[in-house]
Amino acid sequence: MILQEKIQAQLPDWRERIKKLAKEHSEVKVAEVNVGQIVGGMRDIKSLLTDISFADPAEGIRFRGMSIPEVIAALPKPDGAEMPYVGGLYYLLMIGEVPTKEQAEAVESEWIKRCHVPQHVFAMLRSMPKHTHPMTLFVLAIQSLAPQSEFTRRYHEGMKKDEYWMPALEDSLNLTAELSVVAAYIYNLKYKDGKQPEFDPSLDYGANFARMLGVEDQKGYADLARLYFILHSDHESGNVSAHATHLVGSSLADIYYAFSAGMCGLAGPLHGLANQECLGWLLDVHKKFGGVPSRDDLYKFAWDTLNSGKVIPGYGHAVLRVPDPRFTAQMEFAKKHFPQDELVRLADMVFDVVPAVLKEQGKAKNPAPNVDAISGTLQYYYGVREFDFYTVLFGVGRALGVTANYVWARALGQPIERPKSVTTKMLEDVVAKATQPA
Ligand code: CMX
């Protein structure tokens, strides 16, 4: 299998580099930690190792060193499509090289081969109460796929440590193949008549997702799905979903345990839920003014939101200090395909007005839009209007990045994570010593 062969070929060199760092340079200091970082949610503490992606504060995310526009331009595309194969992105994340069209298609074929969700998963989903949140269903479905884990089976047979990554890759390919079917099934079960259009083995990942979701404009939505999954795949390892997956995986739990932990984190309002809150805010503006408001009205509305003690969703970021290139890519897509759509025009006006308002308020370190400022608007345009489902979409994309990290973490023998805690008294003592007059 293509990914296995490529990783195998790269492994000796990577293992040597890590071994050298750990054996010969483990005492070299990388950064210092201050009290603010410990009290403030470990913000910016450099303590995670990944080569899959890097979020540069001044540039945004780079996948294997490539910016979003570079990735979209370089990855091969299905015939007649505007956006690249999702399988091509998976190849890039796993291998660190831009695939040829044949290589991207080989990953897509692996997914098609492995796309057999066991019937008990659907039966379990059908047995849940109708009002269950789609993210709860998603997590349960991931867990219910766990009995197929190759990693767990081989672990209990006593596989050697340097082989861990192989069944980890098997599991990751199976999981990512099945997730799109599971997500579409949840959508159809919860919001439609429960019948799901058949998976078509002649289509790629994005087109199949559009088909299974049953949207009207299949071609347009297939491109959006490809773009959406690519953009949401990874944002280095410190965010909640990536870090939770990595942490749980470091205990040698299989990817089903690890990824479902990540998805529980994604379900939180400060992480994956923000996209639906952002669209909700745009729709509130739209409703209040009966369409796209004047700039003055929007300016006042934004200030009213801040004055009522709320944040303006879709703006600000923990790491980025510029407009998120994932926002820019989606805005360009919307302006190219449906520039006259009222919500797109409104989102564009918000982009013009809100950063200035946040700057005037002077609190947010980054007054620019993040990925969530537009992603719901695009889904809404294509008729996917069930807000609660948006985090599931995010999860399908996020699986690509976190499983690539999981495979490489096992390949490089990354150990179980165990940071150290301190007590409040210890911090106070450190502060007292540091601030003592000489
Ligand atoms: N509207 C109003 N106030 C904001 C703000 C916004 N969009 N963004 C930041 N602020 C405020 C913070 O609430 C904070 O206020 P307090 O000092 O009163 O607590 C202050 O500005 C400083 O915050 P920060 O250091 O700039 O931002 P954080 O790293 O603490 O938080 C984030 C980052 C994303 C949670 C925050 O910007 C926010 O709440 N934005 C709106 C929600 C949102 O869009 N979330 C999606 C994140 C996307 C992602 O994770 O990829």
Image: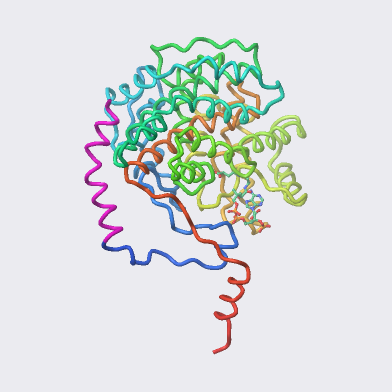
Nearer to me, 378 or 131: 131
Which residue is situated farthest in the bottom direction here? 438
* Quarter assignment of residue 386: top right
* Quarter assignment of residue 251: top left
Secondary structure mostly seen in the magenta stretch: helix
The image shows residue 198 at horizontal and vertical percentages of: 49, 10
Nearer to me, 416 or 291: 416
The image shows residue 79 at horizontal and vertical percentages of: 35, 17
Residue at 45 percent across and 22 percent down: it is 206
Nearer to me, 335 or 201: 201
The image shows residue 322 at horizontal and vertical percentages of: 50, 50
Q: Is residue 7 magenta?
A: yes
Residue at 43 percent across and 51 percent down: it is 56
Q: Write the start and end of the magenta stretch as one range.
A: 1-23
Q: Is residue 254 magenta?
A: no
Q: How is the image coloured?
A: rainbow
Q: Quadrant of the N terminus?
A: top left
